[in-house]
Image (cartoon, rainbow, N blue to C red):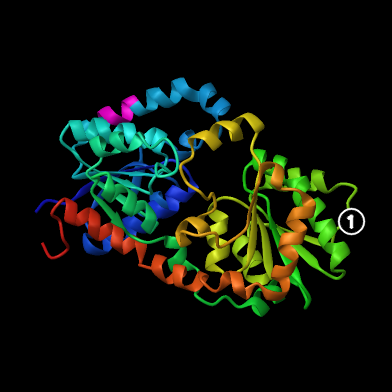
Amino acid sequence: MSALRIALVAGEASGDILGSGLMRAIKARHPDVQFIGVGGPLMEAQGMQSSFPMERLSVMGLVEVLGRLKELLARRKLLIQSLIDARPDVFIGIDAPDFTLNIELKLRQAGIKTVHYVSPSVWAWRQKRVFKIREGCDLMLTLLPFEARFYEEKGVPVRFVGHPLADTIPLHADRADARAQLGLGDGSVVALMPGSRAGEVGRLGALFFDTAERLLALRPGIRFVLPCASPQRRAQIEQLLQGRDLPLTLLDGQSHLALAACDAVLIASGTATLEALLYKRPMVVAYRLAPLTYWILKRMVKSPYVSLPNLLARRLLVPELLQDAATAQALAQTLLPLLDNGAEQTAGFDEIHRTLRRDASNQAAEAVLNLIGASPSQ
């Protein structure tokens, strides 16, 4: 059997992490595999020859995308043609659905097997996209079990592989050790996590600091820790903090250390809520969108919950305060009791962690190799 040639395209840092783990697991079974496509530094370190820098795909927000649409479409067209010419054994699109689903469709039409790794939120909104996925995708790999159930119902071949975060985050995090590393003593510590994007921090930052001031008044001696996602977010947060006197430690990255160290979390809806769950920390989820966006989404979203812990538990496990309900008073009143008896909320977290802990990279590698009939024994 000739050496495998596998094409992958990742569009942002989270995809680069997933892609590199998958590549490592495939290489362990097929050491002479060749990787082509587009990836970041971690995928390049695993032997990917990237057609162009992954950063050219990392565009957030509608306006930014419009500004770069011509370039993105041109790059995609060239990429599709070069991949059809290269005839890989399989193509794997990693997340970035607006970019990769179209590539999968074209390659599958050209007779190349296709896999999509990380489900878009089709179960929540824009459900019609599932038909495009069914047409363009030989196999969907999902990180979460409720996503797999959705695809099974829609007749899309699917495998739930588990979540890599559940593999890397320990079942029991050492709070005392994390506090020692951050120089936080005893007493209550609340992690503030207002999101990683400028818009999120803009809408939630001041609200979270107002909430922190209320908590401090109710519980003197409380400390706060806030992991900044990037230097840009740190500058934005420092500006929002001007004129406030909060016992707050800003961190560069280190969100996992902040979660390990804290007693409870005030958090924006997003992947970070899953990380807080895996660290078994009680949380209050808040989110605010531009009013028009919220109005539109409220009519489109089919799911009763927005946060991953509730979607995974299939019940209201953690409080969600959205839009006008997210006031400093309401957030402080909801969070305060969790500092003393958060165990009630976190009781179900361990079971979810174990459900998601399935050695995702190896599961994904086996699913891909089975699809193309290249199991390691051959």
Task: Give the total of numbered labels.
Answer: 1
Q: Report x, y in % for residue 153.
A: 27, 48
| Figure quadrant of residue 250 | bottom right
Residue lying farthest to the top in this orientation: 70
Quadrant in the picture for the C terminus: bottom left
Residue 151 is left or right of residue 230, and the answer is left
* Mark 1 lies on residue: 245
**Mostly what secondary structure, the magenta segment?**
helix
Instruction: Assign a secondary structure to mark 1.
Output: loop
Q: What residue sits 23% from the left and 48% below the top?
A: 157
Q: Residues within 10 Å of mark 1 (few under 14, many from 20)?
A: few
Q: Is residue 80 above or below residue 343?
A: above
| Figure quadrant of residue 53 | top left
Is residue 64 on the magenta stretch? no
In this view of the protein, can residue 280 be seen by the observer? no
Nearer the observer, 319 or 308: 319
Q: Is residue 205 above or below residue 354?
A: above
Q: Report x, y in % for residue 365.
A: 27, 58
In this view of the protein, can residue 319 be seen by the observer? yes
Is residue 78 on the magenta stretch? yes
Nearer the observer, 377 or 191: 191
Q: Report x, y in % for residue 159.
A: 28, 55
Q: What residue sits 47% from the left and 23% below the top?
A: 69
Give the residues in magenta. 77-81
Nearer the observer, 55 or 171: 171
Nearer the observer, 121 or 233: 121
Residue 106 is left or right of residue 191, and the answer is left
Q: What residue sits 45% from the left and 66% below the top?
A: 166
Residue 182 is left or right of residue 135, and the answer is right
Q: Amino acid at mark 1?
A: Asp
Quadrant in the picture for the N terminus: bottom left
